[in-house]
Image (spheres, grey):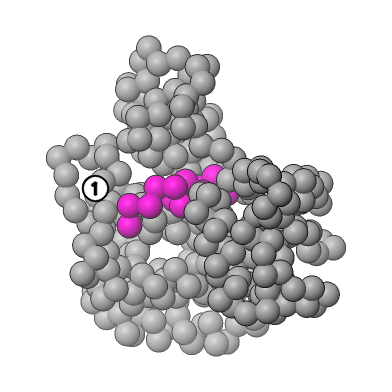
Amino acid sequence: MLLVPCVAMAQTADSAHVDSMRTDSARAESTHVAVSRPDSARGDSLRADSTGGDTIFRAAQRLAAEGQGDSARALVGQRLDAAAPGSAEYVDALYWRAVVAATAADAERDLRTIVVTYPASARSADALMRLAQLELARGDRDQAVAHLQRIVIEHPDSPNRGRAEFWIARTLMDEGNMPTACARLADASRLTPPGQVELANQIGYLNQRCQGVDTTAPAAGTRAAPHAPPAATGATAPPAATGVSSRGRYTIQVAAFSTLASATGLRDVLVSRGYPARVVGTAKPFRVRIGRYETRAEADAAAKAIRAKKFTAYVTSAETP
């Protein structure tokens, strides 16, 4: 059974509600729980990994399931120490360290490292899925949807795309946005590989709620695309444009793409709306970043302002100018 870090979840009678994934905050930082509920986001992580782990990682997984977390983390740590930084083996070990992490914070740190520093890795989509699960457990549906949308947009070959669309649809249903939810559910059905029978059954069950729903009707509160911050109004610069330095140590990453055209398109949109955006890299992944900041505090404040608009934003070390 695949473990996920941290959180005891509240149980509700209606398993269709994401509220069944809220955390017991008093225990969130101190315990692992094995989850087997097939209708929960964490139970769904049992089937969400797009690539398997080798014998060492599976052994660590078993140790963690048996309550031997320290031994599991030591085993993964040995593999991480032996891998060349940046290699596929290194990223895989980083991912599994998150899987057997002692706390949610430890897991989230490694998962964010993968999606920010190694967005083109085979584990990036899996890391985004787990980050979405953590956000759903915390009750932050907007951030969860932002992670899920990144899977759909940035990982066109990932077998997780159908699963991501399913959880987006389910979250939107819980918010009462049925037209958009049902449209996303149709996308989930289209993107689900034939071999994912259980996911197809979950989609079919949820689709019963879409009978008679007009998916072509505009819906109030429809979520915007995850990488297009709203247009700035008036003469006031967006929060991310304040405190910017030409040679700052920190920057904000908002996306990474496999094609230069996609990255350039997003950069142009951001620039037109007042954000000091740029494309970083001469080969994939092409990263889209905003600003340079002298201090981590300035970068964190700018990233928080972007995330407040329900968009993805990670603080990372700025590249050399």
Q: Is residue 277 above or below residue 39?
A: below
Query: Residue at point 72% right, 77% down?
Result: 248
Q: Where's residue 303, x and y in %? A: 57, 63
Quarter of the figure that contains the N terminus: bottom left
Q: Which residues are magenta?
A: 138-150
Q: Inspect this view and state whether residue 33 appears.
A: no
Total marks drawn? 1
Give 198 or 184, whichever is nearer the viewer. Answer: 184
Residue neighbourhood size for the residue with mark 1, other residues' Cα within 10 Å, grouped as few (<14), some (14–19), many (≥20): many
Quarter assignment of residue 317: bottom right
Give yes or no for residue 146 being in the magenta stretch. yes
Magenta segment's dominant SS is: helix
| Amino acid residing under circle 1 | Ser
Q: Where's residue 179, x and y in %? A: 44, 23
Q: Is residue 255 above or below residue 189?
A: below
**Is label 1 in a helix, a strand or a loop?**
helix
Give 63 or 33, whichever is nearer the viewer. Answer: 33
